[in-house]
Amino acid sequence: MESAALPVNRSKGAAPSFLGQLLGFNVIWAVAFAIVGYIVAHWLGGKIGANIAAEQNPGGTDQDDIAILLGLFGSIIGWMLGLGFFNYPLKRMLGRAPSLHEGVDSSTWRYFRLCTDHKVVAMQYLVATLFFFFVAGLNAMFIRTELTSSNATLFPAGNYLTLVGLHGTMMLTMMSAGVIGPLGNWLVPIMIGSRRMAFPRIESLTMWLTVLAGFVLLSATLLGGFPTGWTGYAPLADQARAGIDSYLVSFLLIGIALVLVGINILVTVVTLRAPGMTWNRLPIFVWAMVTTSILAVLAAPVLAAALYMVMSDRSIESTFFISSSGGSPLLWDELFWFFGHPEVYILALPGFGIVLEILPVFARKPLWGYRMAVAGMFGVALMSFMVWQHHLFMSGINANLRPFYMFTTELISIPTGLIFLNGFGTLWKAKIRFTVPMLFCLAFFFNFLIGGLSGVFLSDVTSDVVTHGSFFVMAHFHYTIMGGLVFALMGGIYYWLPKMTGYTINQALGKLHFWTMFIFFNLTFFPLFAAGMLGMPRRVSSYNASLHTLNVFVSIMAFCLGLSMLIFLGNLVWSLVLKRERASDNPWHSKSLEWQIPTPVPSYNFEQIPTITGDPYGYGLPEAPVVDFGRRGAVAAGEAGA
Amino acid sequence: MSIAPEKVGRDEPHHGRNIAIIWAIATAIMVPVIIWVVGPHIPPGSLTDDTRAQHAVDVVLTALSIPLLMLVWVYLGYAVINFRADPASGTIVDGPPLRSNTRIQATWLIVSAVLVVGLAAYGTVDLLTENGAGGGQGSNPLAKPSDARSALQVQVIGQQWLWTFRYPGYGGVETAQLVLPVNREIEFHVTSLDVVHSFWAIELGVKADAVPGADNIAYVKIFRKGSFQVRCDELCGLWHGHMNTTGHIVSGSAFNSWIHATVTKYAAVTKYLPPYSLTYYPIPTRNAT
Ligand code: HEM
Ligand SMILES: [Cu+2]
Ligand SMILES: [Cu+2]
């Protein structure tokens, strides 16, 4: 605990000159070193692999996976080197004193390198995940364009599969980092009254690994694409061309980043809470981050192990997934979904947290059933490790296990249902203000309910015989992830961005964005339940001609949904770049700690570590104490807009 | 701008009662509509015993989800209309500081637990009877039709990117055509030669993954003659979307004459096939795309 006791340096260091910044460690060098790293390691791998490949696969291998995999790992090392992640460990080995600060100054450069200010990391995360969100969204537009015809017309079959795989993998990886990265890193320390995360350098590392993962995934297109979708089923993955190496390495990077982010959040919440921040007063969003982190820490290593096995099958010709050599194709399915199901709750819990955090503010009521909400989140988190075989009902797993997994899957709807009860209790006799964040939260319940109810169909084995692997599943998980998580994230962005950036976000454009997104989201995805039940499998570019009209309708709605996302982008540009209207300290009149400190938030967050005197949900009791900032004080609850 | 607690009046409307009434009416209208108007159109039809079971389950589940859907919609709608702040007044008014209610929470828990246990029991019963027999059950089926012993065995072999079918009862003859007799129990044995595929015949209500080295069993009994679509339902590489074929359901006697003609036609080829087996262990190819 030596480092925790270190004094926090409140003054930002003087910024070096432009040339100094340019020549220092930053993302420009990272890109350069990553390319060099790839070339060097690829060359090395070619030397190592030459003999193996020739012996094992006479005439069979047309691409050298050892070289490519090593090359990708080389680029990871180059990337970290260029960003300066090895500086501190080296300096410490040479006897330098410990420090929690690196790269913190007032220049714009801090956004382009290793920086230990958690607010900077969060903004980096936000920009990065939104960037990849839009890239993946663009892929969805291409997919929907192809599906306007019942035969493959636009893309060759392989490219179409790559598009689907890129869209799915990028959405899921970036959105699993999409809340815990930006909002988690920004809010958790401030909400618990801390000046930093427990491991500031690891925090920055997770962010830069996530960025690299996005680009590595995109590099699949240079290596021939990959045919497996986001699920990477072996032995197809063993067999596929080199593009899948990018998928494997990218997913591995995300797995590592998830584990590190999880550990960081858990340690932060356990060790760095301000005096008086008891477990009973912890904001519900922080609880959501805690449970998400538990899932990430426990599930992602299984994914990493499985990915490693495929890499070794592909490079050194091991046979984990080759049945003729003693391996098992089902092993991948089991390992992948053992991670995969917790992963979908990594995508759900943050949404619960955001919604339950925002609802009380605009209902002007305390969060109803706080303890139940926490219990619900833990229930979901723990049970999500017991349901993964519901993805394998048709795969020929031991038939005797199917009733059990059906039961556990249906059981998990109980803790999920509690979140609805929390929401309803909070809305009861409320004084609702229909701000943009609130609209997104209300829509969350509407959408997530449809996602959840369709999940009941999928959990029933008899019904799943029809819907498994069809567009019904597609509609189901878009309703939970997009209708749930992404709607909540949008609400969170509209709600917290004024605090995070210091500028207000245009509400009129926000409402336009909300209504178009809500309407076209439902018009896009609801018909797909029918498409699935009528026999349309996932991941095909040619389908039954009888489903043509339906698909054309869906595609048009999807394009409108895409336009709605452009309204969102336009709003961000308008509000943050063009208009730049200063936000007040507490525009929503929230009682939560993050709104009681000045906007923009100073780099040390709190003048003095505050003393927490109540939970942040004391609505209805004007005097309910929330926080005591000590002698110097700050904006007290309630005085904000006066 | 000041923040004031709400003055609670005596003449408050009975919100709970109102919501319950609207919910009951909505449910009472919607459930019959779902069962009798929408229900008959829910896929996958009534061609086989499996599709009938699946259709029944889907109607039940849809009908069951209506009350829940209505509960959430009615509540949300009611709250949005009745529990809104007065935008005209400049003050921000707080709602009552309610934090929890043990009775409501306990009721909610109990009701959802009952629903879940009921659902799981219903689903399990289906799985133990023939109703759950259409999904791939692995090599040791739990749901076995009563006439499984006299069933016609058909092996379904998936490979990139086509389906072939072997009839072990007829010398293991292998053909690219799937022809099945009507009104007879059929026992599919699904396996694969390379990667994971999934054998999906939606009109039959059959879906079973084809996994290399594994034998995946599914049963069906077909009630009418006709034809049906076979599609691959697990991503298996480049031409996954084209791994389709059409199957035919014919009368018992037509099936007999077809299979005997096929056996004769392919006699010369069948000799050189690997002997019939539940699984095959081919050497996997690399980089087939
Ligand atoms: C503009 C909104 C979106 C549209 C129009 C859209 C559309 C699609 C389409 C057409 C597919 C391919 C279906 C198939 O053939 O299997 C797909 C797959 C998928 N989408 Fe989206 N999507 C959208 C947003 C999202 C979001 C926000 C997420 C998650 C955060 C997401 C996650 C996925 C995943 C995981 C897959 C499966 C990929 C696979 O099969 O491997 N999508 N989406
Ligand atoms: Cu799952
Ligand atoms: Cu396939």
Image (spheres, helix red, strand yellow):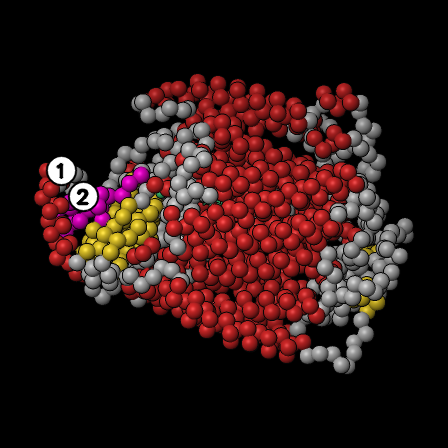
- Tell me the subunit letter for badge 1: B
Quadrant housing the C terminus of chain B:
top left
**Which quadrant of the view contains residue B187?**
bottom left
Quick one: label 2, few (<14), some, or many (20+) residues within 10 Å?
Answer: many
- Tell me the subunit letter for badge 2: B
Q: Is residue A278 above or below residue A48?
A: below
Q: Position of residue B165 (x, y in %)?
A: 22, 46
Secondary structure of residue under mark 2: strand
Secondary structure of residue under mark 1: helix
Q: Position of residue A81 (x, y in %)?
A: 63, 25
Residue drawn at 38 percent across, 56 percent down: A466
Q: Position of residue A541 (x, y in %)?
A: 42, 41
Q: Position of residue B168 (x, y in %)?
A: 16, 49
Work out whether residue A547 or residue A281 is closer to the camera in this orientation and state it.
A547
Work out whether residue A623 or residue B243 is closer to the camera in this orientation and state it.
B243
Q: Is residue B49 above or below residue A254?
A: below
Return the residue at label 1: B269
Work out whether residue B69 or residue B104 is closer to the camera in this orientation and state it.
B69
Return the residue at label 2: B174
Work out whether residue A576 or residue A341 is closer to the camera in this orientation and state it.
A576
**Residue B229 in magenta stretch:** no
Q: Disc 2 marks which amino acid?
A: Glu
Residue A464 in view in this figure: yes
In the image, which residues are magenta? Answer: B161-178
Residue drawn at 75 percent across, 64 percent down: A364
Relative to residue B258, is residue B67 drawn left or right?
A: right
Q: Disc 1 marks which amino acid?
A: Val
Residue A278 in view in this figure: no
Q: Are marks 1 and 2 in contact (CB under 8 Å)?
A: yes
